[in-house]
Image: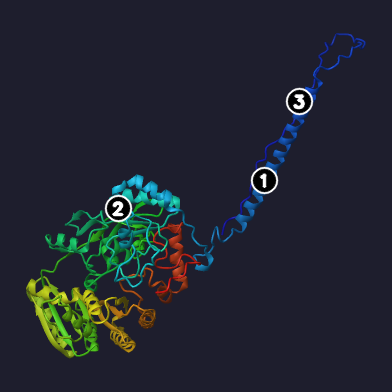
Amino acid sequence: MLAKTKLHVWVPRLRFTRQFSVTRIPLNTKPQPPQQHTEIPPTNSSNNLKSESKSNSNRKSWTSAAFFLFGSLVGASYVSYKVADNPPSFLFPQSSITPLNEVISPKYGDPTEAIAEITKLLGAEKVTKTQSDLDQHSDTYWSTHHATASQRPDLVVFPESTEEVSQVLKICHKFKVPVVPFTGGTSLEGHFIPTRQGICVDLTRMQNILKLHQDDLDVVVQSAVGWEDLRDYLDDYGLMFGPDPGPGACIGGMIGTSCSGTNAARYGTMRENVLGLTVVLADGTIIKTKQRPRKSSAGYNLTGLFIGSEGTLGIVTEATLKLHVKPKFENVAVVSFHSLSDAANTVAGIVQHGIAANAMELLDSDMIKFVNESGETSLVYDESPTLMLKLGGNSKEAAKLLTNTVKIICKENNNKSFKFAESEEEKFELWNARKVALWSTINYGKQKIDEDVQLWTTDVAVPISKLCTSLEDTKEAINKAGFYSSIVGHAGDGNYHAFILYKNTPEEYEKAKQVVQGMIDRAIAADGTVTGEHGVGYGKRDYLVEESGEDAVSLMRKIKFSLDPNRILNPDKVFKIDPNEPKEESH
């Protein structure tokens, strides 16, 4: 509540003076009789009249101006008092949240001037407007939601430093031009669709590993460093970075979606593996969220605020990442089961026994079939529900003991086969089926269904105790709808993915959409989440409201508007920012 304040208004005093002729008479002078004056006719009387008239007019003008100024000051004082007493909600919202129906539509500027200034700033070699580049920065085949023909950036820029990113954002902020950040382009929920056109900031030229602090187990990198390149770099030091998502993912995008990968059950998601960030805000301000210590209770957790924000609050240009010592010994095991429920129950058993598997992946029988038919692996796998496990320790004996314990749990849940490998070549061969899962599904669809087959990739996460039921219900719903599909999951933390293949028709799209809605509804009913690692993007905005509720999403919107008042950063992602958002074109 704004405090009432007495307003003191300064009003200038108005002085009007008139000149008089005065004759000084000495005190000792006797009075003289009045003298006879001869009337002298005025000369140029017309000019004198005009001069007097002009003088009167000027006095009237000044008088009018003075009264106008006085009235304006009084009026402004009254309005200020009333605003302080009861500020209008559109200027000073009194609520802690920002509901969508209480905001007005954003007004974006013409990008022409911004493009000219950015081009002058960066030079022609760091910008592009070729159609192929605009297309590549708008959409991918494997994305669940696709850009329309008109949803293309006006310009793609390639800054090479945090300072250049800052300068670009200052220009875009000034002209109110939308900005979409881009790194690897591997996201799945339409995260970088340029719904409002504008500028795409491609960070791929910022791909340097800046500093390794080996003794402190952390590393500072730029946002376009690929996690696979970082993995190879750290191998020489016996270190590793925990998260390992799909091929091609870069650190900046991984931070944006808070992704994880196959190692999440042991090493956590990006939220647990990022120590600090350098971020450029919407107006070009550069901030560093935190120093390098493993713990800090100083102020708000700004690092956590930006992780998972999907480029809607700021653009991450550098990150300090937590590292881990690689297990000295690690076995890879591939275990097949008679049913999906047997495999899921094994996962629950391993977790409940307190066994910290380095990775625990579940593939359904259709996924194994697609891998076999793809020819992407040299091995032929048993086409049954399968668990793939990484089991490690600091000694060979410890790793072997862990493997034997897991083998007992698998046997209790009716496993069909148990294969494990110790050599690096065998490990690669056994684990390779997991890494080619997505591509194998796509290839199967193109070969067996239609060359123009579409893929709906989605994920949910549920508590471990609910995983078995959730998996079985989802598989049953997909089969009942008549779709070819595969399921693969990071089973150790209850997160699984469904790859649904459907023909490119409106009817098939709507049917797939209903299947996904059922999957989402069941996950929420099981006290789960609508996305474990893909993020919300454009495709899951409505599902986020379903999970978190309108008020929680309105709080997110409040935070967004405070940091990005012009709503230029990755518009229309995570939640709606425009009550009059243009309707989505039919699929």
| Residue located farthest toward the top when viewing the structure as drawn | 29
Number of the label disc, if any, that sits on residue 72: 1
Front: mark 1 or 3: 3
Q: Cβ–Cβ below 8 Å for labels 1 and 3? A: no
Element type where label 1 sits in the image? helix
Along the line of sight, which residue is nearer the eye, 163 or 111? 111
**First reached walking from the N terminus: tag 2 or tag 3:** 3
Side (left or right) of 233 relative to 559: left
Does the residue at mark 2 contact the one at mark 3 (Cβ under 8 Å)?
no
* Residue 291 appears in the rendering: yes
SS label for mark 3: helix
**Which x, y percent locates residue 447?**
22, 79
Residue at screen point 27% across, 79% down:
450
Badge 2 crowding class, 10 Å Cα cut-off, few under 14, some 14 to 19, many 20 or more, is many
Q: For residue 460, what is the image quadrant?
A: bottom left
Identify residue for label 3.
Answer: 51
Vertical placement of residue 573 versus 441, above or below: above
Residue topped by disc 2:
158
* Quadrant including the C terminus: bottom left
